[in-house]
Image (spheres, rainbow, N blue to C red):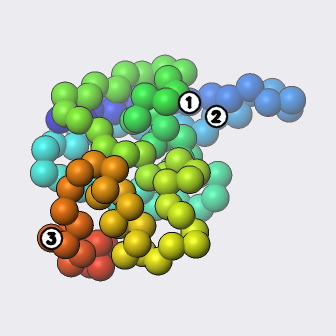
Amino acid sequence: MLAIEHVSKVYSTRQGPREVLSDVSFKLNRGENLGILGRNGAGKSTLIRLISGAEHPTSGRIRRGMRVSWPLAFGGAFQMHLTGLDNLKFICRVYGVDYKPLIAFVEEFT
């Protein structure tokens, strides 16, 4: 299970504090999927960085009771000069996983 409990994230800027996430809470059980959608600046990448552990929340708690896979929202995760299939093959190679059974899932997801 992944539990995000009352998580907020504030960055210091020249103009003062900027709250990117405010009191976000959800649970994700093993086998469940979650899509994160929003406009530019809505906090999607920040949430991914928090879940991955690359950053810490300003307040709240993140409990990781399962493995968190490659944080795809990080810059550089997808190679822009590769096709979607080639990106899938690349990431699967990193994890030592056969890409073929995942093609249908990725096609449906995208």
C-alpha distance separating marks 1 and 2 = 6 Å
The residue labelled by disc 1 is 9
For label 3, count other residues whose C-alpha is less than 10 Å away and answer few (under 14), some (14-19) or many (20+): few
Occupied quadrant, residue 102: bottom left
Q: Would residue 17 appear left or right of 76 to someone viewing this image?
A: right
Q: Could you tell me which residue is drawn at 63 percent across and 28 percent down? A: 10
Q: Say which residue label 2 marks.
A: 19
Q: Quadrant of the C terminus?
A: bottom left
With respect to residue 37, does 106 lie above or below?
Answer: below
Q: Position of residue 78 (x, y in %)?
A: 50, 61
Marks 1 and 2 in Cβ contact (< 8 Å): yes
Label 3 element class: helix
- Of badges 2 and 3, the one in the foreground is 3
Front-most of residues 51 and 40: 51
Q: Mark 2 packing: few (<14 Cα in 10 Å), some, or many (20+)?
A: few
Dot 1 or dot 2: first in sequence order is 1
| Dot 1: element | strand
- Which residue corresponds to mark 3? 101
Residue in view at x 64 percent, y 52 percent: 41
Q: Hey, what amino acid is under mark 2?
A: Glu
Q: Identity of the amino acid at label 3? A: Pro
Mark 1 vs mark 3: in front: 3
Of residue 89 and residue 51, the one placed in the foreground of this image is: 89
Foreground of the two, 78 or 26: 78
What is the x, y in percent for residue 55? 52, 27
The image quadrant that residue 2 belongs to is top left
Q: Position of residue 69 (x, y in %)?
A: 31, 44
